Amino acid sequence: MPHFLIDCSPGVLKLKHAEDILREVHDTAESTGLFKPGDIKVRIRPFEHYTVGNTKKDFLHVFGHIMQGRTTEQKADLSKRIITRLKEMFPEVPVISMNVRDFEKATYTNRKLI
């Protein structure tokens, strides 16, 4: 916990290596102080088939899934920091966005908890 899933157009991976994108999202999330570095998980999924406003414009969207308990302000700061960093990395990509969703503690489990 947390999980950051990055959806993108294939053109994004022609501009930067996936490893660089993963590292930047990880490091930016870590810089918020909200998470332990070893707990942050980041994955990237390029989509061959997509449309953005009925076009083939490049895009990046980050889905942040975090454990409940953070304030709206903390989640907004997390989103703003990650999007700011991605805009710096990809000034030519017209669509860059993010949303944050909470995991519910009562229903979350993993192998360590069983």
Image: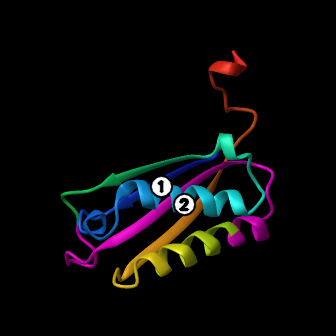
**Badge 2: few (under 14), some or many (20 or more) residues near its Cα, within 10 Å?**
many
Q: Which quarter of the figure has residue 77?
A: bottom right
Residue type highlighted by circle 1:
Leu
Residue type highlighted by circle 2:
Val
> Where's the N terminus, which quadrant?
top right
**Residue placed at 62% from the left, 46% from the top?**
40
In the image, residue 49 above or below residue 3: below
| Residue ID for mark 1 | 22
Q: Are marks 1 and 2 in contact (CB under 8 Å)?
A: yes
**Badge 1: few (under 14), some or many (20 or more) residues near its Cα, within 10 Å?**
some
**Residue placed at 58% from the left, 69% from the top?**
82
Residue numbers of the magenta segment: 51-77
**Would you say 61 lies left or right of 93 here?**
right
Per the image, is 72 magenta?
yes
**Residue 94 position in % (x across, y down):** 35, 83
Q: Secondary structure at mark 1?
A: helix
Way the structure is coloured: rainbow
**Residue 99 position in % (x across, y down):** 56, 64
| Residue ID for mark 2 | 25
**Residue placed at 68% from the left, 20% from the top?**
112
Q: Is residue 1 visible?
A: no
In the image, residue 26 above or below residue 1: below
**Would you say 51 lies left or right of 92 here?**
left
